[in-house]
Amino acid sequence: MSLATQSYNPPQQVVLLPQTQQLKALMTIIRDQNTKRADFVFYADRIIRILVEEGEDYHGVEFQGHICGVSIMRAGESMEQALREVCRSVRIGKILIQRDEETALPKLYYLKFPPDIASRYCLLLDPALATGGSAIKAIETLIEHGVLEEKILFLNLLSCPQGIAAVVAKYPAIKIITAVVDHGLNGKKYIVPGLGDFGCRYFGTD
Ligand code: URA
């Protein structure tokens, strides 16, 4: 847990990575806005690898042949490579959710899932759990495609109490595997202290 949230007691659905010296050092590097992009990618990838291994360990050996990944585009795509490295020939679906300009609600624009997704555990990939709006829409879509709520593991590097509360209030049977829980959200719905826009920093865009 980050320094900002030492007193926060996450709900039982949250699996927080062990707060090792290594993880703290990696997080410090990627939080730093002066970190160059190459370093940001390298150190973020190391944290993602730890997260994916934790996610895979979570249900043990039997789990391994029966999983798939689903990345929430675009930032979640940064987590696909680590999943491929850890789970041989894993199937990976994608989902694109964006804010509807008219309603201001998260709207589903695109999805592509493995055909047998309903029989699999699903590792849902998105580096940041901020308000929870996209995550809730993604989970709703997975459930509509037959995935059992208790077979969804949501993996993120950075989360906050508001996002966690929103997701578990709607879907109490899922698990959230997160590297750190930060203090909260600012007026622009960015996580604070956070690390800025993960997707832009990782992919080098504005
Ligand atoms: N997405 C990000 O990349 N960062 C945040 O702080 C919130 C959402």
Image: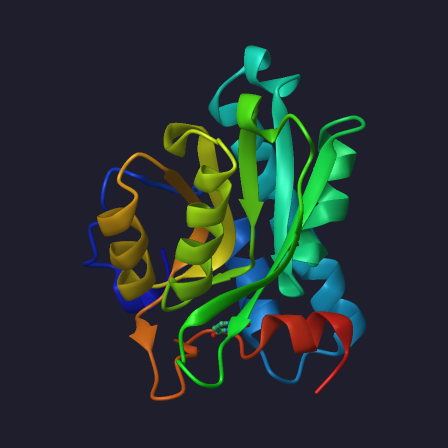
Across and down, in percent, residue 185 comes to 34, 77
Q: Is residue 11 rendered to the left or right of residue 157?
A: left
Across and down, in percent, residue 68 comes to 64, 32
Residue furthest out toward the top: 62
Across and down, in percent, residue 11 comes to 22, 44
Residue 41, image quadrant: bottom right
Report the quarter where the N terminus lies.
Answer: bottom left
Q: Is residue 19 rendered to the left or right of residue 198?
A: left
Q: Is residue 163 rendered to the left or right of residue 19?
A: left
Residue 69, image quadrant: top right
Relative to 155, residue 204 above or below: below
Relative to 99, residue 107 above or below: above
At x 32% / y 53%, what residue is drawn? 167
Report the quarter where the C terminus lies.
Answer: bottom right
Across and down, in percent, residue 71 comes to 63, 51
Residue 131 or residue 139, whichever sits in front? 139
Residue 4, image quadrant: bottom left
Number of numbered discs on residues:
0
At x 56% / y 18%, what residue is drawn? 63
At x 74% / y 30%, what residue is drawn? 90
State whether residue 34 appears in this view.
yes
State whether residue 192 appears in this view.
no
According to the image, what is the colour scheme of the structure?
rainbow
